[in-house]
Amino acid sequence: MAMSCKESSKAAAAAAAAAAAGMDNGKYVRYTPEQVEALERLYHDCPKPSSMRRQQLIRECPILSHIEPKQIKVWFQNRRCREKQRKEASRLQGVNRKLTAMNKLLMEENDRLQKQVSQLVYENSYFRQHTPNNPLSTKDTSCDSVVTSGQKHHLTPQHPPRDASPAGLLSIAEETLAEFLSKATGTAVEWVQMPGMKPGPDSIGIVAISHGCPGVAARACGLVGLEPTRVAEILKDRPSWFRDCRAVDVVNVLPTANGGTIELLYMQLYAPTTLAPGRDFWLLRFTSVMDDGSLVVCERSLSNTQNGPSMPPVQNYVRAEMLPSGYLIRPCEGGGSIIHIVDHMNLEAWSVPEVLRPLYESSTVLAQRITTAAVRHLRQIALDISQSSVNNWGRRPAALRALSHRLSRGFNEALNGFSDEGWSLIGNDGADDITILVNSNPEKLMGLNTSFTSGYNSICSSILCAKASMLLQNVPPAILLRFLREHRSEWADTNIDAYSAAAVKIGPCNFLGPRVGNYGGQVILPLAQTIEHEELLEVIKLEGIAHTAEEAMMPRDVLLLQLCCGMDENAVGTCSELIFAPIDASFADDAPLLPSGFRIIPLDSGKEASSPNRTLDLASALETGAAGNKPPNGLSTNSCATRSVMTIAFQFAFESHMQDNVACMARQYVRSIISSVQRVALALSPSGFGPHAGLRSPLGTPEAHTLARWISQSYRSFMGVELLKSSSGGSDSILKALWHHSDAIMCCSMKAASVFTFANQAGVDMLETTLVALQDISLEKIFDDHGRKNVCSEFPQIMNQGFATLPGGICSSSMGRPVSYERAIAWKVLNDDENAHCICFMFVNWSFV
C-alpha cells in the first residue's frame, strides 16, 4: 500500500535521524494510534523530555517497549518542529490578513484623496474664473465612497425645522448619517495626516486632523481584532474608555423601521484644568446596519433651531456642540473589524481664558485625547482577549485597567469639584491661587470607613482637596513628568505621604506631623503597560528607616498605586499625567482610593526638538558663562519654545474637627510643591542654559571648577598619570573634559553614611539620576554585597596610600537596574591645603546589563 504524503515525510525524517545516529534505515517503526496517543500525552506535559524521562515512558508504556530510545527522541524532535511550523504558519496567516485589510483601507483612503484633489482642482478653477468678491462654492458633502457604492445624498446648508416626533427625529438621524459618512469616507472635510502618526501594520491606523473646517475634528481608520457588534458596544460606552467623560445618560430610546435605534443622550465631560468649566452635550445617536453589513453609530447635538427636544443649561457646564460624528464598523475577512472614527466638535473656546484656548481650538488635542484613545482601548481589549494572561500581583489586564481608570476618574472628580458630588469651597487666604475644597458626602466616605482586623475603625469624616494650576514656559512635559516620577524626594514630603496612607488604611487618623520619621528611598514595581506604551501602572514603595528596635518591629513602608501617562517626548500634543493614591498592602481591587497628582497639558502643538535619549540632568549646561555656545545634547535655546499648563490636585482624608489644621497643611504643601516644580522646570528649560539664566547651574559655579581641578590634581599625584587630556588648560577646559569623560566619575562624602556629591555626565547616566538628586543616593546602596566588601577592605588603603583599584562587578542604578563595570578606581581628593575633601570613584567600561 502506498504511503500518504504526510507518512512519507515522517518516514524520511525518521530514516535520516536514524542514519545520523548510526542506526539501520530498515528499522523504521510505524507508530500505532495507541503509541502516538501515549507520546502526545507526554509531549503536552513535557515537550522536551530528558533521556531519563523517555526511558521512564518506555517502562510505563509497554506498547513502546520495542521502540528504541533514540527513535523516540527523533519523534519528539519532529513533533517540536511541526509545532513550531504550525505556530509560525498561524502567525504569518494573521500578519497576511492584517496586511490585506490594511491594503484595502489604504486603497480606500487613496480613492478618497483622489476625490479630494479633484474637488480642490475644481474649486481652484472656479476661483480663477470668478471675481474675488464671489464666494467660493461649498465643499461637496455627498458620501460618494466605497462604503455607499455611489449613492449620493444632497444636503441643504440650512436644515428645515422639525418637530420632536419620531418622524422628525428620524429625519435628523438620517441627515446625521449622511453627513457622518461624507466625513468618514467622503470629501466633506479636508483631512491632513496628523504629525507623528505614520500608518503601518503595527500602528493604530491612519490618523488625520481637519484643515479649515468649523470647530475641531479628527479622524482615525484602523484594524481591531473584535467583532463589529462588540466594537459598537465598547465605543457607545464612552465613560469606559474616554477618561474625560464623566457620564452619559440615555434619556429616551426609539426603534426605527430598519432595526436601528435612535437615542437621546445627555453627556458631561470633565474640565482638564482648574481654569475652565466642564462641557456638556445634548445629543441624538443613531445606530443602524447598512446594506453591505457595516454597522454605523453616528451622533450630533440637538439644537433649538431644529425644534427637537431641548435640555436646559446645567450649572458649572458650558453647552458644547457635537457636529455629525460617529463610528463606521465593517467586518473584516478572517475576523476582526475595520473601523472609521470621526470626532467633530465645537468646544466653545470663548468661555476659557485666552491662554487655554489652544486646548479647545486644536484638532491635534482632540485626536490625542478622544479619537486615538478609542482605537487604543479597542486594541488593548483585543490583546487582553487573545492573551488572557495574568500580570504582576496576580491580576488580569482588565482588573489593572479598571484600577487605572479609577485613579484617573478620581483625580478628575477632585480636580473639578462638582457640587452634586458633595464638594464645597472653603475660604481662601488670598495669598495665592490655591483652591481648597471639602467633601463630607457619606457615600464618598463609605469606602474609607471600613473595619480592620486590628479592631480600629477609620473615622475619617471628610475629604479635603487642595488644587492649583500654573503656566510653564519652554519645558517638555514628558521630561518634567519623568523627573517627578523618578525623583519623588525632590518635591514630596514623606510625612505627608505617611499621613495620607495612615488616614486611608487605619484610624484614628491623627495628623502625624514630624513624628513620622525618615524614608530611605523609593522602589518602583511595574504592574502593567499598554501596548502602545501610552500608560504605565505601577506600585511605588517608600521604604521607611527604623531608628529603634520597636520601630523595626512595625512595617513603616508606604505603598502608592501610581499611573503614568504621556512619557514619550516625541509624541505630539500629548497630555502627561502622574496620578497616585496610597494603598494597603493587601491591595484589594475595591480598596478606597484618594488620587492626587499632576497633569501637564501642552498648549502648543509644535513638536519638541529634544532628543528622546536626553538625560534628566538638571545641570547639564557646561557653557553657562560662555555666550553664544550651544548647550549639550544639541539643544538650542529655542528648541523647546512651548507653553504648557500644569494642574496639581492633592486629596487628604481627615477628621472633621481637624479641618483647619489639615487645610493649612495642605495649602503649605501645595505651595512647596509649586516652588519645587518651578525650580525643576526652570532648570529643565533650555532657556536656563544660556548666559542670562535665572537659575545658575551647579556646573557653572566656581565650586564646580575648583572641584574638577582637585579631582584632576589628586589623580595625577596618586596615580602618576593624567586623568584628563586637557588638564593643562584653564578651569573651564578641565571641567568640560571631566564632564565629557567616557568613564563614570563620581565623588562621595567621607562621612559614615557616604552619599554622592558630584558626578560627570557618564556618572549621572549610570546612576540614572540628576546632579540635584545625587545627595539622595548613598555609596552603600549602589553596590551589592560583594562590592561593599571590596570597598570596606580597600578603604584603609585609600585613606593611607591615597588610591585603590577594585575588581569588576555589578552595581545598581538609582532605578534598580544592574550595571556591570570592568574595574573601579578610587582615590582621595585633596584640597588646596592637602586635606582630604572627598573620595572619587571611576567606573571603567560600565554598561547596563
Image (tube, rainbow, N blue to C red):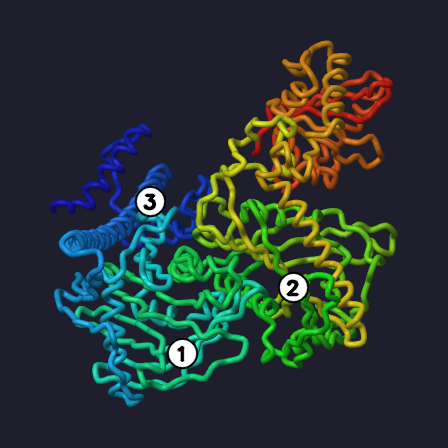
List the single residue furthest toward the bottom: 165
Identity of the residue drawn at 49% across and 45% down: 569
Q: Nearer the viewer, residue 336 or 661?
A: 661
Q: Are marks 1 and 2 in contact (CB under 8 Å)?
A: no
Q: What residue would you read off at disc 1? A: 282
Instruction: Judge by depth and name the residue closer to the eye, 295 or 283.
Output: 283
Q: Judge from the rendering whether residue 100 lies leftward or rightward of residue 439; answer left or right.
A: left
Element type at marker 2? Answer: strand
Q: Earlier in the sequence, mark 1 or mark 2?
A: 1
Quarter location, residue 33: bottom left
- Secondary structure of the residue carrying tag 3 is helix
Q: Single out the residue that lies furthest toward the top.
A: 720
Q: Position of residue 161 (x, y in %)?
A: 27, 84
Q: Quadrant of residue 300?
A: bottom left
Compared to residue 709, the image places residue 591 above or below, namely below
> Can the viewer see residue 518 in this picture?
yes
Q: In this view, does 489 lie to the left or right of 11?
A: right
Residue 14 point in image, percent of width and height: 27, 38
Q: Name above or below for residue 142 compared with residue 303.
A: above
Q: Name the residue under label 3.
A: 84
- Badge 3 crowding class, 10 Å Cα cut-off, few under 14, some 14 to 19, many 20 or more, is few
Circle 1 packing at 10 Å, graded few (<14), some (14-19), many (20+), is many
**In the image, residue 334 above or below residue 295:** above
Give left or right: position of 665 versus 45: right
Q: Can you say which quadrant of the picture contains the C terminus?
A: top right
> Is the C-beta separation of discs 2 and 3 under 8 Å?
no
| Residue 361, image x, y percentages | 42, 60
